[in-house]
């Protein structure tokens, strides 16, 4: 509430907020975002230019093109509004990651101006609110629902269909699939349905959320679910203070070591993976039935090597633990102060920078009842669940072999060490990033 208007805080949320997977390095400006060097010069350090900073790799872009043309919800007979912003950011040597230009639509024209930090303060504030409003839609429906809940649902259904309970891969995965089908069924009826909460208070409620999710599903890739490639492909491996990236990579390594340890106990060679007919039926179900009609998903429908199996199982466990925690557990922190991440907008984006008033901002933001529902639902979804099982704690003992139990013990020990490392890193930070502490993370997607 005290810092939400500040540019550094706005930039920080792209790194460590509830939607930390959108920011990409900008090598050249998109043709539909005509920002000039003169426009942003006052935001840069005096001795440099936009062209030089692009070349140096210090300019970043967040593009909500996926929101373009999504039909807006009608709430209590009143049409809501949606934008598809482009936001340019600069990694400033002293101020951190700061926004330097915002365009609230994909087509530049006189009614879609480029907003700048040098504009009237209320115009710049409202432009940032519009970006944060798009963040709410993308983080809830795509980063959270589609890329964690629904991705893991595919693994879950295939595991229940194809792997017998005595199969080692069933034993490995089952604790990480607990309650996921149940919460997804509840999500469909209580959150996403035509009489659900999204329809009541969110600008993409109704048909919009289906179209938005379908668009993301069509471009979803297996590669993007693997943290190493995600950060590499977005060009963000060197971005400073990107705690989500650093902790994700540490967790990925610990998970991969664990999975590799278990898999190596039961499969001595690649040919043993290939010859396991139940495992092959499982991967076929995942790739062909689960991720059906995704043209470039990139997951083969057969497993040929131990390495392929280890990677897929690591993706499943990482997604159901770390990735879900990163997008789910901070919801209330970032959305409880509604102007920071509004669930809907009741007026269209501003077309005239000089006409923005506080009255216009208040009329645009969610009304009191919409704000109350946003606060209530993000508190409910983001809070620690009373019967939560923390990551790496296996309440039901699926594995009984001593060798497997040793691998599990090692996993727990590594998670504990990782937690200590994360807590030490956060010491003295005013704004701590603790969402990926293993003790604060659930073993599976249960909410």
Image (cartoon, rainbow, N blue to C red):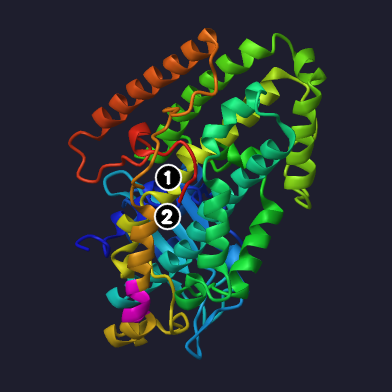
Secondary element type, mark 2: strand
Figure check: 63 above or below 309? below
- Quarter-of-image position of residue 264: top right
Checking the image for residue 202, the label placed there is: none
Q: Relative to 375, is 238 above or below?
A: above
- The percent position of residue 14, horizontal first and vertical second, equals 41, 52
Residue 27 appears in view: no
Whether residue 389 sits left or right of residue 170 in the image: it is left
Question: Which contiguous range is marked in magenta?
Answer: 365-372
Instruction: Residue 381 in the image: state x and y as whole percent.
Output: 40, 56
Residue 231 percent coordinates (x, y): 52, 38
In the picture of the structure, the residue carrying the numbered disc 2 is 89
Nearest to the eye among marks 1 and 2: give it.
1
Residue matched to label 1: 326
Name the image quarter holding residue 371: bottom left
Q: Residue at x 20, y 33 (%)?
A: 427
Question: Could you tell me residue 335's position as x and y percent?
Answer: 34, 62
Which one is in front, 215 or 200?
A: 200
């Amino acid at each position: 509430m005290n810092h939400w208007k500040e540019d550094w805080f706005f930039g920080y949320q792209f790194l460590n907020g509830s939607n930390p997977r959108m920011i990409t390095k900008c090598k050249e400006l998109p043709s539909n975002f005509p920002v000039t060097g003169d426009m942003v010069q006052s935001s840069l350090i005096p001795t440099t230019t936009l062209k030089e900073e692009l070349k140096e790799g210090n300019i970043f872009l967040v593009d909500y093109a996926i929101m373009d043309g999504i039909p807006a919800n009608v709430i209590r007979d009143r049409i809501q509004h949606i934008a598809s912003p482009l936001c340019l950011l600069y990694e400033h040597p002293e101020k951190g990651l700061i926004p330097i230009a915002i365009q609230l639509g994909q087509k530049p024209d006189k009614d879609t101006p480029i907003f700048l930090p040098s504009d009237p303060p209320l115009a710049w504030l409202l432009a940032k609110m519009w970006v944060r409003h798009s963040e709410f839609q993308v983080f809830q429906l795509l980063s959270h629902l589609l890329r964690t809940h629904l991705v893991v649902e595919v693994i879950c259904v295939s595991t229940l269909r194809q792997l017998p309970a005595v199969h080692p891969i069933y034993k490995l995965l089952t604790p990480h699939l607990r309650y996921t089908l149940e919460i997804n069924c509840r999500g469909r009826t209580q959150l996403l349905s035509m009489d659900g909460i999204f329809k009541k208070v969110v600008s993409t409620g109704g048909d919009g959320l289906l179209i938005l999710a379908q668009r993301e599903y069509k471009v979803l890739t297996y590669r993007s679910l693997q943290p190493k490639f995600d950060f590499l492909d977005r060009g963000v491996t060197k971005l400073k203070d990107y705690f989500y990236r650093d902790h994700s990579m540490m967790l990925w390594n610990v998970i991969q070591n664990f999975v590799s340890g278990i898999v190596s106990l039961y499969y001595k060679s690649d040919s043993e993976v290939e010859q396991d007919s139940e495992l092959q039926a499982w991967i076929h179900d995942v790739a062909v039935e689960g991720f059906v009609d995704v043209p470039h998903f990139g997951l083969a429908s057969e497993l040929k090597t131990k390495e392929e199996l280890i990677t897929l199982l690591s993706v499943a466990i990482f997604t159901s633990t770390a990735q879900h925690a990163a997008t789910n557990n901070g919801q209330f922190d970032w959305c409880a102060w509604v102007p920071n991440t509004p669930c809907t907008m009741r007026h269209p984006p501003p077309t005239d920078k000089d006409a923005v008033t506080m009255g216009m901002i208040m009329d645009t933001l969610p009304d009191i009842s919409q704000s109350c529902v946003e606060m209530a639902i993000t508190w409910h979804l983001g809070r620690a669940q009373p019967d939560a099982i923390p990551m790496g704690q296996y309440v039901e003992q699926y594995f009984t072999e001593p060798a497997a139990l040793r691998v599990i013990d090692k996993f727990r020990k590594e998670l504990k060490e990782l937690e200590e490392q994360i807590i030490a890193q956060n010491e003295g930070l005013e704004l701590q990033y603790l969402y990926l502490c293993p003790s604060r993370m659930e073993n599976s997607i249960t909410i």
